[in-house]
Image: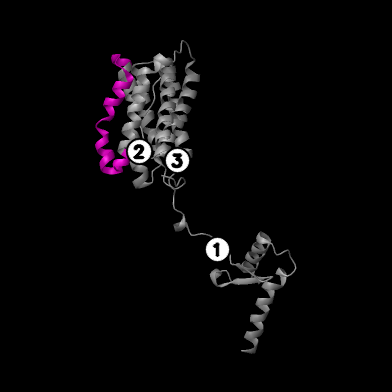
């Protein structure tokens, strides 16, 4: 018992002695205390360890548990702002692709193919093609996600139908259009995904797979988009198809690198 008492005093002395030789202000004391805890192997009970420093008590340091991190919910204004900005960025990418005769992936790619084949308005086709997918969105992703996605699709359809009144592109290199358009599409879709919205169709499907199975939305959509773009070989020149693939890869790379499951905790 005498040896146990000596060991206890020795352990206490090893913790408090270094603290007497340093400045006792805030972070210095806390960092030294943490170092002593790790050295002495007593960090297993951090809540019970307190050290008096010039009459003040310095609590032990303990990292916050992951369960204590509660994501901040986006406000209605933040959601509305993101939907408008996201749709605006996507509409810019769509106009760049249309001016260069390119196609994109997802439901927009299907609308592009039908637009080139029939001459019908891209915005009208895009809005109509997405209507059947809202049932899946409502059943699997919830009412809030469905309403946000419907608003985003309606905004994009309207912007696309009136874009020629706001901007006229007389000539553009297909390579430049593919790169800049793909980046614009990716950033717009990222803004929507961060606020639990999508542009319907394939976007709803891949976000459902990510939320329920952990599959990365960017990678899944990249595979689907490439299949849609390749089908455009029957309508446009091969070189334009190639630049369309570059745009699709850039768009989905932005999603794959910046919208990984568990990394972004806001909703």
> CA–CA distance between discs 3 and 1?
30 Å
For label 3, the residue is 259
Number of labels in the image equals: 3
The residue to which callout 2 is attached is: 206
Looking at the image, residue 114 lies above or below residue 258: above
Say left or right for 146 vs 68: left
Observer-side mark, 1 or 2, equals 1
**Please, what secondary structure does the residue beneath circle 2 have?**
helix
Relative depth, front residue between 236 and 212: 212
Q: Residue at x 51, y 59 (%)?
A: 64
Q: Which quadrant is the C terminus positioned in?
A: top left
Q: Position of residue 24 (x, y in %)?
A: 70, 65
Residue projecting furthest to the top: 170
Span shown in magenta:
116-145
Mark 1 → mark 2, Cα distance in angstroms: 39 Å
Residue 2 at least partly seen: yes
CB-based contact (under 8 Å), mark 1 and mark 2? no
Q: In the figure, residue 156 lies in which quadrant? A: top left
- Dominant secondary structure of the residues highlighted in magenta in the image: helix
Q: Position of residue 101 (x, y in %)?
A: 40, 16
Task: Decide: few, some or many residues near mark 1? Use Cα within 10 Å; few <14, some 14-19, many ≥20.
Answer: few
Q: Which mark is residue 201?
A: none
- Tell me where residue 15 appears, x and y as whole percent: 67, 72
Q: Which type of secondary structure does the marked residue at label 3 adopt?
A: loop
Mark 3 crowd level (few <14, some 14–19, many ≥20, 10 Å Cα): some
Q: Which mark is residue 62?
A: 1
Q: Is residue 53 above or below residue 156?
A: below
Residue 44 is at least partly visible in this image: no
Describe residue 56's horizontal placement relative to residue 126 as left or right: right
Name which quarter of the figure residue 260 lies in.
top left
Q: Disc 2 or disc 3, which is closer to the eye?
A: 3
């Amino acid at each position: 018992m005498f040896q146990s008492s000596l060991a206890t005093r020795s352990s206490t002395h090893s913790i408090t002695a270094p603290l007497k030789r340093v400045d006792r202000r805030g972070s210095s004391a806390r960092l030294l205390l943490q170092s002593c805890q790790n050295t002495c192997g007593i960090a297993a009970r951090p809540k019970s360890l307190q050290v008096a420093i010039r009459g003040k008590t310095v609590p032990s340091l303990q990292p916050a548990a992951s369960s204590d991190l509660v994501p901040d919910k986006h406000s209605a204004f933040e959601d509305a702002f993101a939907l408008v900005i996201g749709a605006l960025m996507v509409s810019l990418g769509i106009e760049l692709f249309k001016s260069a005769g390119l196609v994109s992936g997802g439901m927009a790619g299907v609308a592009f193919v039908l637009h080139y084949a029939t001459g019908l308005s891209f915005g009208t086709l895009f809005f109509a093609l997405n209507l059947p997918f809202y049932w899946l969105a409502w059943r699997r992703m919830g009412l809030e996600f469905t309403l946000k996605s419907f608003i985003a699709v309606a905004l994009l359809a309207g912007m696309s139908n009136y874009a020629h009144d706001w901007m006229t592109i007389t000539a553009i290199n297909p390579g430049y259009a593919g790169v800049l358009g793909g980046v614009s599409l990716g950033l717009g879709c990222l803004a929507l995904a961060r606020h639990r919205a999508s542009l319907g169709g394939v976007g709803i499907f891949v976000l459902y797979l990510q939320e329920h199975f952990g599959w990365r939305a960017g990678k899944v959509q990249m595979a689907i988009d490439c299949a849609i773009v390749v089908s455009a070989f029957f309508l446009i020149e091969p070189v334009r198809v190639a630049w369309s693939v570059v745009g699709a890869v850039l768009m989905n790379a932005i999603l794959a690198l910046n919208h990984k499951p568990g990394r972004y905790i806001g909703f």
